[in-house]
């Protein structure tokens, strides 16, 4: 009985901690969006979230908060690989290559639409802030690694040869960079669907098989 009680209490604590973290990240997201990364202080994040400075510091330094916000906004969760997302698994399971590729580019367009402004803000801040610059590099390295793994799906579907897989992964990493979305949609007024169609066409240019 005591073990059950301890497990229940542990679950409650974990649930409260997760809720607090989500609240802090939501406050950070809003402030970064409203006034930029550099101008936002940890104190302001704590005030907006209604928590102590200690609680925010326990969540992470400012650069870590931005990285977590970007991950959560793009995928909807933290700590989950791109390929583990239910919608991504469903896309990969789609038997029709044309349909799968279109759904893939639309999924990326939707994710980028949620983070493009924040990503660009963080990128600009990185010129003068080594911490956020390093955080973005880690994020990009992780994204490149996931795309490299995911490129095997293109091989399995007959879209890319094994010999061209690594090269294709590098190209796909470049094409799907958040800055591309920012350039086309935020700066030049394209719709998210315009971006998805451009990305689809660009990817097809580098496929070996029919799609």
Image: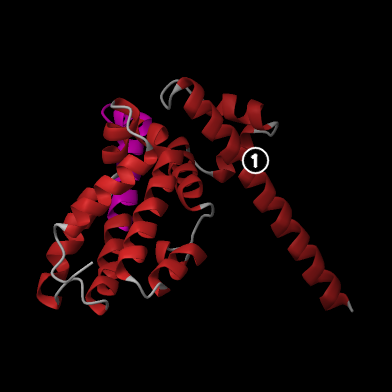
Point out residue 95 in the picture as x, y percentages from the top left corner: 37, 75
Q: Nearer the viewer, residue 72 or 67?
A: 72
The N terminus - image quarter: bottom right
Residue 180 coordinates in the image, percent (x, y): 26, 40
Colour setup of the view:
secondary structure
Asked if residue 67 lies in the magenta stretch, the reply is: no
Q: Tag 1: Cα neighbours inside 10 Å, few (<14), some, or many (≥20)?
A: some
Q: Main secondary structure of the magenta part?
A: helix
Q: Any magenta on residue 140?
A: yes
Corner quadrant of residue 164? bottom left
Residue drawn at 78 percent across, 71 percent down = 7
Residue sitting at x 41%, y 33%: 118
At which x and y percent is residue 48?
Answer: 64, 27
Q: In this rendering, is residue 81 above or below 66?
A: below
Residue ranking furthest to the right: 1
Question: Badge 1 is on which residue?
Answer: 23
In the displayed structure, would residue 132 be above or below residue 146? Answer: above
| Magenta residues (range) | 121-142
Relative image position of residue 101 (x, y in whole percent): 32, 61
Instruction: Pick the quarter of the image with the C terminus.
Output: bottom left
What is the secondary structure assignment of the residue under circle 1?
Answer: helix
> Of 172 and 80, which appears nearest the observer?
172
**Residue at (66% x, 32% y) in the render:** 49
Position of 95 with respect to 209 (left or right) is right
67 to the left or right of 13: left
Residue 136 horizontal side relative to residue 209, left or right: right
Q: Quadrant of residue 20?
A: top right
Closer to us: 71 or 174:
174
């Amino acid at each position: 009985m005591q073990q059950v009680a301890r497990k229940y209490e542990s679950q409650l604590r974990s649930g409260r901690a997760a809720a607090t973290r989500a609240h802090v990240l939501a406050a950070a997201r809003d402030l970064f969006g409203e006034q930029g990364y550099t101008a936002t202080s940890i104190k302001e994040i704590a005030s907006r979230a209604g928590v102590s400075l200690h609680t925010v510091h326990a969540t992470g330094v400012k650069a870590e908060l931005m990285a977590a916000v970007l991950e959560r906004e793009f995928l909807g969760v933290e700590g989950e690989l791109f390929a583990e997302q239910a919608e991504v698994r469903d896309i990969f399971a789609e038997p029709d290559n044309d349909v799968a590729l279109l759904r893939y580019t639309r999924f990326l367009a939707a994710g980028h639409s949620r983070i493009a402004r924040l990503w660009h803000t963080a990128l600009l801040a990185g010129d003068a802030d080594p911490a956020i610059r390093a955080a973005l590099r880690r994020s990009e390295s992780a994204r490149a690694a996931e795309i490299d793994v995911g490129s095997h799906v293109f091989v399995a579907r007959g879209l890319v040869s094994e010999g061209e897989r690594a090269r294709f992964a590098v190209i796909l990493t470049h094409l799907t960079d958040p800055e591309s979305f920012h350039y086309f949609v935020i700066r030049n007024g394209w719709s998210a669907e315009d971006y998805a169609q451009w990305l689809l066409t660009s990817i097809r240019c580098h496929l070996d098989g029919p799609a």
